[in-house]
Image: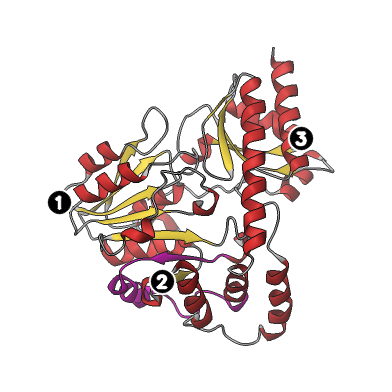
Amino acid sequence: MDFEKLTRNEVLRVQRYIPGKPVEELQRERGLAEVVKLASNENPYGPGQGVLKVLEEGIGHLNRYPDDSAYYLHRNLARYLEVSERRIFIGNGSVEILYFLATLFVEQGDNLVYAMPSFVIYDIVSKLSLGEGIVVPTDDEFRHDLGRMREAVNERTKLVFICNPNNPTGTYNSESELREFMESIPENVLVVVDEAYYEYVQAPDYPQTIEWLDRYPNLILLRTFSKIHSLAGLRIGYSISHPELVGLLERVRPPFNVNSLSQMAADASLKEIDHLRMVARENSLGRNYITKKLTNLGCRVLPSQTNFVMAFLPLDAKVAYEKLLDMGVIVRPMGNFGTDMNAIRISIGLEEENNRLVHAVEDLLKNNN
């Protein structure tokens, strides 16, 4: 049977998402005992002790369905963010919410505007929707070119995706830049600002967008527990937006979309303030270390406000990626992001992992000369 003939054309346009190579897979492929994975922007420190404790307690209740309303997490997250509970929507990762938004709003003939390179899921969501994706290249500094994105918005635009800070570049747009963009956008165009790396940002001019929600009812903020909260394996994220939009999202949300362990872990992580501060501090130290060392080796490293850096090595990135795999170091080549950029993305790891990455790149460049 030819299943492709039965398949929607929108689905056939999509290339499967390629995650970072798993540690176990590389160990099997190349017979390596020790492997360092710095490919998927994961938090190397793991969740706080309070999170681990509630997970142990929750395992004994897996025979029960989770709280469909995520009552306690809604309540405590609203207090944590200092917003109304009616503004919060909990998703099975913030990615799920992106799919919901396209389902809710994008009809035949509509379009979605987003940057490239940026989070690849925007492109996948766009292709799966009934609309057309309008891709705007980033500027010379690999930041969202908000001026060109505004020019791309037209009377058929339903959604604009802005990743700030941007993945995979680590760059960001300032408060004044994003404010000017929001002021120029019609109210019937929904602007989704993806702030997955919000807690890592140190730039003083980074926008505090929660304070903008009353001013811009068409603004939707996405955040996640996958990054600084170390809950990537439990898949839980959320949006902050106008209450009416939350009501619409609830219409397309499947029952029990967020499991009980995810809800408990996220709720507990909100109390792990000291742990989260430690993670942010150590990430900054590691990011500065990798940036300095690779720059000294002749690599261009983009300034980053995230838990990763994007680096341009003085050799072919695909070759570098494969040779680093041979040395037991997994990074992320930019070809997986739908670009031909000669660059790799490197997640910030533990001190010993960062050291191993630097030494591996040093050996790689030395042997390449």
* In magenta stretch: residue 207: no
Magenta-drawn segment: 235-261
Residue marked by disc 1: 155
- Residue 356's disc number: 3
Q: Residues within 10 Å of mark 2 (few under 14, many from 20)?
A: many
Residue at 27% x, 65% y is: 214
Taking the view exactly as shown, the residue that stands out farthest to the top is: 369
In this rendering, would 206 be left or right of 263? left
Count of marks overlaid on the render = 3
> Which callout, 1 or 2, points to the residue nearer the camera?
2
Q: How far apart are marks 1 and 2 (CA)?
A: 28 Å
Q: Distance between the residues labelled 2 and 3?
A: 41 Å
- Residue 367's x, y, as percent? 74, 17
- Element at label 1: loop
Residue marked by disc 2: 88
Query: Does 89 appear above or below 34?
Result: below
What's the residue type where badge 2 is placed?
Answer: Ile
Which label's residue is closer to the chain start, 2 or 3? 2
